[in-house]
Amino acid sequence: MIASNRSITKSSSGTAPPEEELAIYVKNANKSFGVTRALNDVSFRASFGEIQAIIGGNGCGKSTMAKVLAGVLKVDSGEVSIMGHAPTTPSDARKMGVAMVFQEVMVADEATIAENLYAGADSLWAKAMPNSEKIARSRVLMRELVGSDVDPQRLAAGLSLGVKAWITIGRALLSKPKILILDESSAALDFDSTERLFTKIRELRDNGTAVLIVTHRIAELIRICDRATVMRDGRNVGVLSKSEITESNLLGLMAGKTETRKTPEAAGYQALASQVVLKTSNLKVWPNAEPVNFDLRRGEIIGVTGLEGQGQDPFVRILAGTADSVESYPIAETGGSGSAAEIRDLQSAKANGIEFVSGDRKREGILPNLSIFENLLCALYPKHKFGSKLNLINWPELEGIFNYEVQRLSIKTGPRSNLITSLSGGNQQKVLIGRAFSLRPKILILNDPARGIDVGTKREFYQHLRDFADEGNSVVYMSSELEEFIGLCSRVAVFRNGSIFDTLTDADVDPRLILESMFGQTRGTKAAAKANRVTPVQAAPRALAAEVPRFPSQSASAIRIVTSEKAPMTKAPALDPMGRPIKIRYF
């Protein structure tokens, strides 16, 4: 049933429920940061042996609530009880059995994987266990979580964002928590990794752990959660039971009105012209990978995806000039006169109107010691100055740009002089997107840009991208959320083994078909082109031959990736990281 604040803080007799029956009990909690009221008379409860979501728009207070429960923040007023006790510090919460995985991936790059996993486990005078045992346990845990062997003595600095996310999750699991709080923990994970996380979460629930998930991914929430608490403007506006957790109910409570799901367009956003503005020819991402031949047309929004570690991340970075290729360079033709320029580094990318936005905002985006205003506009300082020798900044011009981007992207800010870290993670990400738009690029390279952004803001962001393309600009949109491509991208390039395995176009831009391609269950662009004697782009719609196994057309409640030595083979069998054949089961 949908319950109001009042109904969840009292039992049928009108008194607060016995605290020992609950894992978490919060009543009339308030928390303010200056003039911003993050929690406004919030009441909340969670039981052992259940998975509960806390969901809401950016800046609604859900991450603040999670930090209060983990002892990171203290409420200004109200009651907070964790198994009958009130934690006042993170150390108190840990002693009670509370473990939290924060939205930002907290990993020390200078430390090894094992050292990161066991950070905080040792006391001042004694070690929790010998180093050799830590390394052995780390190896087993990371193999279970990542799905392949990972050297626990390797430094974290060179790891992908997905593997770093697993380290933070593993650190929490090692504490064997009674209460596990996950704040956007799946945001840095691809589909396969998310499935492994869900398996672990269900296992914890079945063993009696209370699991709280703070998330924006509604499709995942519907599948995994037993209950959902919806927050808006610092208030708890409703609680949904398992049967009531639907997209329309969630969006209605989040927005304060009834919303219906928009039907995706049959085809994605179409390019305005055939003019190619960015291309690669025989470019190699890895030494032993197949060459990548890719083109981006004027006014086009093209999607890029793949399983974790299949080469799509370094590829988009090569396009943006932030990473080096093994062979060849991207060619940009954005000048309009037919002149071409190689993209060899960040400087040449910027000279050709290419801007990059990363989903890893902590490492590659925000400047934590600067204000919201400075983070959004610092890249514009050289363009808005006067006085040839004094180099004075034209503040009135920048103020107008700041106000425009904040209003356009609906960024919830306090005073603009506040540090960027005072904003929620989603609003920090919107500042980075606003920074890119303010530079007026011709090509946007986006690496999981909507990570941490709520569903309502995502819809607005997609419309901004369409408007951007309408003006004759182009977008490369990399994402691990397959649903993001529907109605947005006219083409999706699927990476596998360091190269484009398949390119899906128009009606074939469908989550099921994309997923099949990610696991090598389609014929691939190269094979289809050879069989039909057409170009790879033309071949994409024909690449899914009838004899290749597909998901059924009816909706399935879940999808499971299964490794099996006896899995039925296609002409080009898919292999998991251990080299075993993969088959996809649906039920």
Image (cartoon, rainbow, N blue to C red):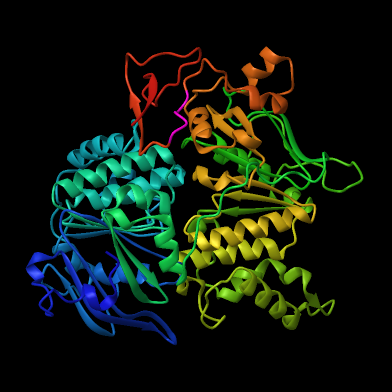
At which x and y percent is residue 141?
25, 39
Horizontal side of residue 345 vs 554, given as left or right: right
Horizontal side of residue 342 vs 121, given as left or right: right
At which x and y percent is residue 95?
14, 63
Which one is nearer the viewer's eye here, 157 or 223? Answer: 223
Which one is nearer the viewer's eye here, 301 or 89? Answer: 301
What residue lies at 32% left-to-right and 39% top-to-bottom? 196
Q: Quadrant of the C terminus?
A: top left
Q: How many marks?
A: 0
The magenta stretch spans residue 21: no
- The part of the image, by quadrant, that contains residue 190 is top left
Q: Is residue 321 visible?
A: no
Up the image or down, 219 lies above or below 89; here it is above
Up the image or down, 331 lies above or below 263; here it is above
- The part of the image, by quadrant, that contains residue 25 is bottom left
Up the image or down, 189 lies above or below 383; here it is above
What residue lies at 18% left-to-right and 52% top-to-bottom? 175
Considering the whole magenta stretch, tell me its main secondary structure.
Answer: loop
Horizontal side of residue 113 vs 8, given as left or right: right
At which x and y percent is residue 59?
45, 71
Which one is nearer the viewer's eye here, 232 or 24? Answer: 232
At which x and y percent is residue 438?
70, 66
The magenta region covers 550-554
Q: Is residue 508 visible?
A: yes
- The part of the image, by quadrant, that contains residue 235 is bottom left
Q: Quadrant of the N terminus?
A: bottom left
